[in-house]
Amino acid sequence: MEKRELVILGAGPAGLTAALYARRAGLEALVVERGLPGGQIRITDEIENWPGLIHSSGLDLADSFRKHAEHFKAEFMSADIKELKVEGGRKIIVTSNGEVEALAVIIATGAAFKKLGCPGEQEFIGSGVSYCAVCDAAFFVDETVAVVGGGNTAVEEAMYLCRFAKKVYIIHRRDQFRADRLACERAARCEKLTPVWDSAVESIEGQGLVERVRLRNVKTNEVSSLDVAGVFVFVGVAPHVDYLKAGLLQQRPGGWIVAGGHLETSVPGIFAAGDVRDTPLRQVVTAAADGAVAAMSAYHYIESGGQSLELERK
Ligand SMILES: Cc1cc2nc3c(=O)[nH]c(=O)nc-3n(C[C@H](O)[C@H](O)[C@H](O)COP(=O)(O)OP(=O)(O)OC[C@H]3O[C@@H](n4cnc5c(N)ncnc54)[C@H](O)[C@@H]3O)c2cc1C
């Protein structure tokens, strides 16, 4: 079986930054990625919150991350990760390209937003359809936008959008939000926010950019439409953790991986970085920062001959 000091699962901003830091620290680092390196930002038109770059396309930023990791001679394997297992303390990554054993592993397989699955959604991603208010609200100053969803994230992101947009519809399948009471009370006080109850999005329409959403009332079946420049979808987000057997690592409901201050998981020598972990903010900058911390933690773990960093601190 092939062996490496460090295997990094996923080549998004977290995995690529981890690779860069690991290589600069002199570790043998292998990055396993099933798609093209870059992660979610590859599908983002514009990034305006990566410090030092006022504006970049997601693709350009992703490519610069990849080139930077390659510059320090990170090794890449194009493969689907099928399983991460621990056998008598040995960490084994089972991939579509064979098995690799590692002294330390960084899990950086990211997350994906749940989709509505309606016509127009895929077509308008980056042209009015968004899954992140922090990322895209600033493109909708004085516009009318719609938020889809009724949980805490939907209500909180709608409130955030109210700082930019002139009007925010919040479209929900039920006749009340699922968000907690505090969020609902704040939403009720916000004059810019208008709930659209009992409604599901049938389609998102426009010429090149989003212009309207077509809705169906789930109780009456009545069809209507709203003129909007943006549609923000918050119907859930899920981490990419299918390859983790239940019970291997501590995870929160929904699958989010729990990691301590050094980003070590409940298994010594396995670290988690970026969107895949239980974290309050999922952005490029936080994913990259996590990648750096996880790589240096992996370095110290390997150098110490396998001492758990989280236990050491206690
Ligand atoms: C449309 C959109 C717009 C966004 N806009 C912004 C923005 O403007 N600013 C900002 O800061 N953030 C933005 N984000 C969020 C940002 O992209 C993420 O926070 C960031 O990419 C997370 O990085 P990551 O490395 O943790 O995970 P990801 O970027 O999700 O990368 C994970 C990688 O792991 C790979 N992977 C997953 N499972 C497997 C497997 N089983 N086998 C092999 N490989 C696997 C994936 O292919 C992927 O390449 C946006 C996200 C989206 C979707």
Image (cartoon, rainbow, N blue to C red):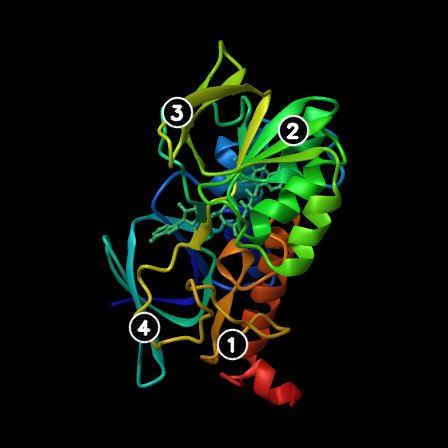
Amino acid on which the number 2 mark rests in the picture: Ser
306 shown above or below 174: below
Q: Residues within 10 Å of mark 1 (few under 14, many from 20)?
A: some
Mark 1 lies on residue: 302
Looking at this view, name the residue that lies furthest to the top.
207
Circles 3 and 2, Cβ within 8 Å, touching? The answer is no
Q: Nearer the viewer, residue 5 or 150?
A: 150
Q: Is mark 4 within 8 Å of ligand 1?
A: no
Mark 3 lies on residue: 222
Amino acid on which the number 4 mark rests in the picture: Ala
Q: Secondary structure at mark 2?
A: loop
Mark 4 lies on residue: 246
Q: Is mark 2 within 8 Å of ligand 1?
A: no
Q: Is mark 3 within 8 Å of ligand 1?
A: no
Q: The N terminus is located in which quarter?
A: bottom left
9 shown above or below 134: below
Amino acid on which the number 3 mark rests in the picture: Glu
Q: Residue at x 57, y 64 (%)?
A: 295
Mark 2 lies on residue: 56
Q: Earlier in the sequence, mark 1 or mark 2?
A: 2
Q: Nearer the viewer, residue 83 or 199?
A: 199
